[in-house]
Image: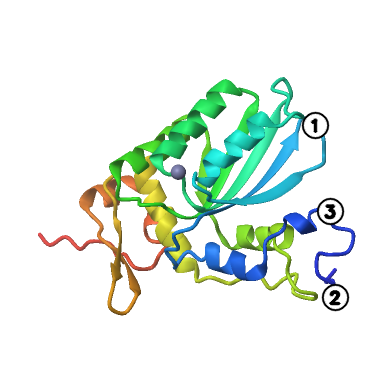
Amino acid sequence: MASDRGPAAGDATLRRRIEPWEFEAFFDPRELRKEACLLYEIRWGSNRGIWRHSSKNTTKHVEHNFIEKFTSERHFRPSVSCSITWFLSWSPCWKCSQAIGEFLDQHPRVTLVIHVARLFQHMDPQNRRGLRDLFTRGVAVQIMGAAVYDYCWRNFVNYPPGKEAHWPRYPPLWMKLYALELHCINLSLPPCLKISRRRQNQLTLFRLEVQNCHYRMIPPHILFATGLIQLPVTWR
Ligand SMILES: [Zn+2]
């Protein structure tokens, strides 16, 4: 049922929600903002309640801050199973991927799912290896799609009255480009998504450079989802 109020009435998470402009700016897959934002939810054992909160980079990365806060809190009980979901504006850098791996090693009853809006410095081999290590550990890392933006808007954003369904409609192309690149990372393939920035006019350019190995290894429905790639033509 559509509500004519914002999330305010009776919502205990209100003070932990971020403002609409923050969500729109931080999670736009076309933008390369410096700052990072983390929206997270935690479920304990069979408890049906969900704890939601948000965090931003300080002098340390958001992932680091989360782990520090989570492990230092008094109500944290390592014997109880716990599932954590992150919605990150940037994917973890290699140092954070390493810290996440160590955190999960130390807390075997914790499971983690990570949704990301963009891939952080994805050409860097160390960052690629870091994400691959997370995959190997069973951490589901995935690119945020329309349904996830909708979910985050409703559950983490202090949207204005009557704007419950007004989550930002970013063009799906960028989500597909990043999803394709994440697949390359998972399969240890070279990058095919190239992102460059033109200083003079502040333009960010996204382009694809597809090699034979990409055609060979990536499932066609992912490879061709962007609509920017065509089957190579072979002449005999
Ligand atoms: Zn980091």
Kind of residue at disc 1: Ser
Above-or-below relation of 84 to 106: below
In depth, the one of 59 and 64 nearer the eye is 59
The residue shown at (75%, 70%) is 164
Judged from the image, the secondary structure of the residue bearing numbered disc 3 is loop
* Mark in front: 1 vs 2: 2
Q: Secondary structure at mark 2?
A: loop
Dot placed on the residue nearer the N-terminal end, 2 or 3 = 2
User: Mark 3 = which residue?
Assistant: 12
Q: Nearer the N terminus, badge 3 or badge 1?
A: 3
Please rate how many residues cluster around mark 2, counting C-alpha atoms within 10 Å: few if below 14, some from 14 to 19, many from 20. few
Residue with the most extreme left position: 236
Residue toward you, 44 or 60: 60
For the residues labelled 3 and 1, the Cα–Cα distance comes to 21 Å
Q: Amino acid at mark 2?
A: Asp
Q: Amino acid at mark 3?
A: Ala
User: Ligand 1 quadrant?
Assistant: top left
**Front: mark 2 or 3:** 3
| Residue, disc 2 | 4
Circle 3 or circle 1, nearest the eye: 3
Mark 1 = which residue?
46
Q: Height in image: 207 above or below 44?
A: below
The residue depicted at 35 percent of the width and 37 percent of the height is 129
**Along the polypeptide, which appears first: circle 1 or circle 2?**
2
Q: Position of residue 219 (x, y in %)?
A: 39, 49
| Vertical side of 118 occupied by 40: above or below | above
* Residue 125 locus on image (x, y percent): 29, 42
